[in-house]
Amino acid sequence: MSDPVSALAGASYDGFASVRELGPWGMITLRAKPGTKGLEKAVKAAVGLGLPATRQMVWDGPATGGRGIGWMSPDEYLLILPYGGVAAAMAALETGLKGEHFLAADVSDARCVFHVSGAKADQVLRKLTPADLDALAPGELRRSRLAQVAAAFWAAEGGYTVVAFRSVAGYVMGLLSHSAQPGSELG
């Protein structure tokens, strides 16, 4: 296996908020109905965390190398872990869910991840998404869009973590950087 390559080589921007591309993360899309036999145990074996509640992100953050699991839809979860751990996590899911109806797909190379931080990090997203950030509860994952592209985000480590498709990484970095330009803060 070759070494993973970051979508934007760790690009960053410092304005009234800081924006940085976080590099390659392991990500698995897991489709399974809640209540599927062995689901909770398989997820725990794969990422070391339990299943999230509806619209929630269970996030262990940088202390564990970035492990998390987010509720994406009634039968879809996004598992996040260090890039090198994906094969073992996929094997744990296969073993734990053997004989059950599910789909697990490695989407690590199809996603890019950004962190927007600073006291006014929310203003960067407020300019780009129709999501109501005032209604975003702690631990909540929101699927929405940034300008014209799909994205998911949650509050983490003094700001927001944003996940988007890798094919639009440059566009998303441009959006976030432009939105964070000094002097463009919201009233």
Image (cartoon, rainbow, N blue to C red):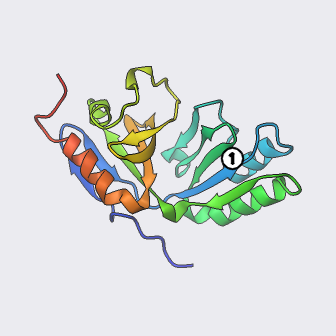
Whether residue 72 sits left or right of residue 93 in the image: it is: left
Q: Position of residue 117 (x, y in %)?
A: 32, 39
- Which residue is drawn at the image coordinates 18% and 42% (left, top)? 15
Instruction: Return the residue at label 1.
Output: 48
Against 146, is 109 above or below?
below
Instruction: Identify the residue at image location x=84%, y=45%.
Output: 38
Label 1 is placed on what type of residue? Gly
Which residue extends farthest bottom? 2
| Residue 127 pos. (x, y %) | 27, 34
Tell me which residue sits at (39%, 38%) in the image.
160
Which residue is located at x 39 percent, y 26 percent?
A: 133
Q: Secondary structure at mark 1?
A: loop
Q: Nearer the viewer, residue 127 or 139?
A: 127
Relative placement, left or right, of 140 versus 166 is right
Residue 94 placement: quadrant:
bottom right
Q: In this picture, is 8 found above or below 75?
A: below
Classify 137 as above or below 91: above
Left or right: residue 90 compared with residue 64: right
Q: Position of residue 132 (x, y in %)?
A: 40, 25
- Quadrant of image for the C terminus: top left
Which one is nearer the viewer's eye here, 38 or 148? 148
Residue reaching furthest front?
148
Task: Write down the quadrant of residue 59 in the picture.
Answer: top right
